[in-house]
Image (tube, helix red, strand yellow):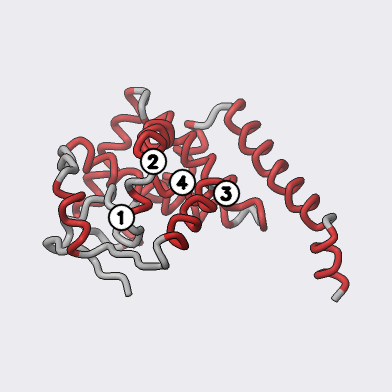
Amino acid sequence: MFERPFYKPGSEPESVMVEQPIQLLMMDERRLAEQFAQAGNLMDLCADEAWLRDAARLEEDCGGQVEAGPAMREYVSRLSPLSAEQLQIVRLQSILFTELRIWLETWDLGQCFEATYTKARQLVRHHLKCLSPEQQTWVEALLREDAQGAAPAQKTVRSQIVTMVGKMLTQEDWQVLADTAAQGMAVRVLQMGQPDGVSAKAS
């Protein structure tokens, strides 16, 4: 049974993975740091098959006894609190990636969706670091609108997200997304060509 750490409502830092065993959080801090520097989101590790196998092995080694409640407090206490700027980035990414996911779901990517969505988030994060003056003004308006708590139908700036993200992505970015989707499909086809895949289809 997982137990959530105690935080005041709304104050949970996104960087704390409350439903991951402490063994997994501490198993390879160098790798976690590299992942955060590259993608800005530790949850992208869940798309890494090698990492997932390591995580499963560690959980099995400890007999499945995992904790994420009081036992996590000492670890959490060592984490630096997020700055106002970091919190703003978290808010912005939450807004953008919610709409990005909805948009990508209309692409009918099937088995390639998660890989393509992960790559799209990485590309958007990269562009958020070097916004043009026009994009910066739009981002500030988006955050102000979100803070006002307007009804969805009244969020006119948010309705522009797909258009703005589309403009952020370069032709090279679109090619990367196409290649990611194609690679995902190729992997899926090759998996189906394995004896287990053929047997499962035949049955």
Q: In percent of the image, x 29 and y 64: which residue is there? A: 67
**Distance (Cα) linking label 1 and label 4:** 18 Å
Q: In percent of the image, x 85 and y 60: which residue is there? A: 195
Drawn side of residue 86 relative to residue 119, left or right: left
**First of labels 1, 2 by sequence position:** 1
**First of labels 3, 4 by sequence position:** 4
**Distance (Cα) linking label 2 and label 3:** 15 Å
Neighbours of disc 3 within 10 Å: few (<14), some (14-19), many (20+): few
Drawn side of residue 140 relative to residue 203, left or right: left
Report the disc number at residue 44. 4
| Residue placed under numbered mark 3 in the picture | 49
Q: Secondary structure at mark 2?
A: loop
Q: In percent of the image, x 80 and y 50: which residue is there? A: 190
| Residue placed under numbered mark 2 in the picture | 28
**First of labels 1, 4 by sequence position:** 1
What's the residue type where badge 4 is placed? Asp
**First of labels 2, 3 by sequence position:** 2
Give how far across and how far down residue 171 sits, in percent: 61, 27
Report the disc number at residue 159. none
What's the residue type where badge 2 is placed? Asp
**First of labels 1, 3 by sequence position:** 1
| Residue placed under numbered mark 1 in the picture | 22
Q: Secondary structure at mark 3?
A: helix
**Distance (Cα) linking label 1 and label 3:** 20 Å
**Mark 2 or mark 3, whichever is nearer to me:** 2
Neighbours of disc 4 within 10 Å: few (<14), some (14-19), many (20+): some
Give how far across and how far down residue 128 sits, in percent: 37, 31
